[in-house]
Image: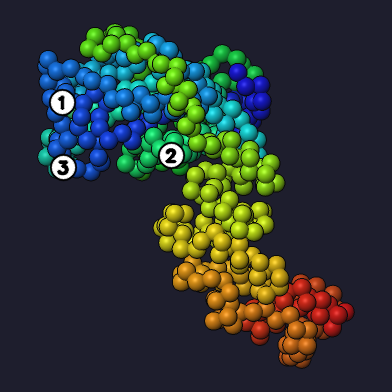
């Protein structure tokens, strides 16, 4: 597909080809085929019933909300919604799967043929979405470190998942991480998945192969599992690409297999040779009728979609004149984008607001482990502080101190400036006095500066700033220093 593809030469004469399979746990109250709760963290096996523990003779009943969530996601990712789809049994044995098969979708998935956009190094790239289908999750095996036994917790068994399968359009580990971020951003905008990778509500299997640059046919791929953060997705792929290149360069062949990422060792390790579709003996699920999707339902869901990250990014670029990079970052979370727009509507200059959010707001939120919803500073308060910079009341440098204090106390900029006496000194006489005092004390530096050591200008600025507690108007100070030293 995409002709916008730039050749990636990071790997010398090889190119990496990556396709991701993302499992997103849908935020429904109940499981996919029974009424059990999906709440995370309850006591083992407390949220189970005969259906989700796979008792014989029980019948599954499809959760309507889950279907709506999957359609929502499909539409948001520009997929076609199949008018007719059905579930299939994927048969395999594992202790966390008591019914002996997963109910998934195989030859007739709900959503097909879409795309999402990612921004990497200033370039927007389209990544194709092959399909999105629904399936139920398995339970969880808990292996006891001491004894030679394991537990099975079936609370997760039957929880609804969407599997979002990408085309092999991704060309670098960085793009893979960006793709993952965008998927997370979209499902969170839609409210269909909380996107929590640590708790496993968003999981990713990464398929990767290499091929000589210019070759069309795909190389043999490995499938990587067990990466529960964006950073691990990136690192596992980086490792695996290098490993495959080495195998080829050493005259060997990449074998199709499933490999496990070991984050402690920073390597991928062979887990098993890759199973083929026919190993699963897929067949249509006989206990569920095929699903016809009413066009009215699709239209209704479409009409209710929020503005999505890619559209919001484009609007931020055109409406506020922001660089793509800023717009991508600000629109990654709905609440963050709303905070930004609110600060601008309160009079903040669009690029200045963006800079402050990407800089100080993010830093302070990170340091205090808060989300943007919990930010103690309201958007209007940032706009008001920016006005104090614009009208010369405070310098841009002092503003950082002011902002930090606003964050700690929730007070307005004006109050902080007054209480802490941080008003910028723009009185030429006062700055001149401070300059004279510094120059008088620094005879040898003055001499060196006049002899051509230009770098000392910074020293003088620093000294005067120290004497004025950082409050001297920087522009005036620079002019005065140049005049006196010139
Ligand atoms: P499988 O049958 O092994 O599950 P699929 O064709 O269903 O493989 O593809 C699974 C994922 O792997 C998709 O995201 C797809 O884009 C990706 N993929 C397929 N072939 C390759 C390849 N040769 N190299 C890298 N990724 C690939
Ligand atoms: Zn149940
Ligand atoms: Mg497959």
Q: Which residue is mark 3?
A: 43
State whether residue 343 is above or below residue 457: above
State whether residue 228 is above or below residue 421: above
Mark 2–mark 3 distance (CA, rounded to whole Å): 27 Å
Closer to viewer: mark 2 or mark 3: 2
x, y percentage for residue 429? 78, 88
Outermost residue on the right side: it is: 486
Q: Is residue 215 visible?
A: yes
x, y percentage for residue 406? 51, 69
Residue visible at 75% across and 84% down?
Answer: 427
Q: Which residue is mark 2?
A: 188
The numbered mark at residue 393 is none
Residue 129 located left or right of residue 37: right
Mark 2 lies on a secondary structure that is: helix
Mark 1 lies on a secondary structure that is: loop
Mark 1–mark 2 distance (CA, rounded to whole Å): 29 Å
Mark 3 lies on a secondary structure that is: loop
Q: Quadrant of the N terminus?
A: top right
Q: Is residue 253 visible?
A: no
Q: Residues within 10 Å of mark 2 (few under 14, many from 20)?
A: some
For marks 1 and 2 on the same chain, the one whose residue lies earlier in the sequence: 1
x, y percentage for residue 159? 27, 30
Q: Which residue is mark 1?
A: 53
* Image coloring type: rainbow
Respond yes or no on whether mark 1 lies under 8 Å from ligand 2. Answer: yes
């Amino acid at each position: 597909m995409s002709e916008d593809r730039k050749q990636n030469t990071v790997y010398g004469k090889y190119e990496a080809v990556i396709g991701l399979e993302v499992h997103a746990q849908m935020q429904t109250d109940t499981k996919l085929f029974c009424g059990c709760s999906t709440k995370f963290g309850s006591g083992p096996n407390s949220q189970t019933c005969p259906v989700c523990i796979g008792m014989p003779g029980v019948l599954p009943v499809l959760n309507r909300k889950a279907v709506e969530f999957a359609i929502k996601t499909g539409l948001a990712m520009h997929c076609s919604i199949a008018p007719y789809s059905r579930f299939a049994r994927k048969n395999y044995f594992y202790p966390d799967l008591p019914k002996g098969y997963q109910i998934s979708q195989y030859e007739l998935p709900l959503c097909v043929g879409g795309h999402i956009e990612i921004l990497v190094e200033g370039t927007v790239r389209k990544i194709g979405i092959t399909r999105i289908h629904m399936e139920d999750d398995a339970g969880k095996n808990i292996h006891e470190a001491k004894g030679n036994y394991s537990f099975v917790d079936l609370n997760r068994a039957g929880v609804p998942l969407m599997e979002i399968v990408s085309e092999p359009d991704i060309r670098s580990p960085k793009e893979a991480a960006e793709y993952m971020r965008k998927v997370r951003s979209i499902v969170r905008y839609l409210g269909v998945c909380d996107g929590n990778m640590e708790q496993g509500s968003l999981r990713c299997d990464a398929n990767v192969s290499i091929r000589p640059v210019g070759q069309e046919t795909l190389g043999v791929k490995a499938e990587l599992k067990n990466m529960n953060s964006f950073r691990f997705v990136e690192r596992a792929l980086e490792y695996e690409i290098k490993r495959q290149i080495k195998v080829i360069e050493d005259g060997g062949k990449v074998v199709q297999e499933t490999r496990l990422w070991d984050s402690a060792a920073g390597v991928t390790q062979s887990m098993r040779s890759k199973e083929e579709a026919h190993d699963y003996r897929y067949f249509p699920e006989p206990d569920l009728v095929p699903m016809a999707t009413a066009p009215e339902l699709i239209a209704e869901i479409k009409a209710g979609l929020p503005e999505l990250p890619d559209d919001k990014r484009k609007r931020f670029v055109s409406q506020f004149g922001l660089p793509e990079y800023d717009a991508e970052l600000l629109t990654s979370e709905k609440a963050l984008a709303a905070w930004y727009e609110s600060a601008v509507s309160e009079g903040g200059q669009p690029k200045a607001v963006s800079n402050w959010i990407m800089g100080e707001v993010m830093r302070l939120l990170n340091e205090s482990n808060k989300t943007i919803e919990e930010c103690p500073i309201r958007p209007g308060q940032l706009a008001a502080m920016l006005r104090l910079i614009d009208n010369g009341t405070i310098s841009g440098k002092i503003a950082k101190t002011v902002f930090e204090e606003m964050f700690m106390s929730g007070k307005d900029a004006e109050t902080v400036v007054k209480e802490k006496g941080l008003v910028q000194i723009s009185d030429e006489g006062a700055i001149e006095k401070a300059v004279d005092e510094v120059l008088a004390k620094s005879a040898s530096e003055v001499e060196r500066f006049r002899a051509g050591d230009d770098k000392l200008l910074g020293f003088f600025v620093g000294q005067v700033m120290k004497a004025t507690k950082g409050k001297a108007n920087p522009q005036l100070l620079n002019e005065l220093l140049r005049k006196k030293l010139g």
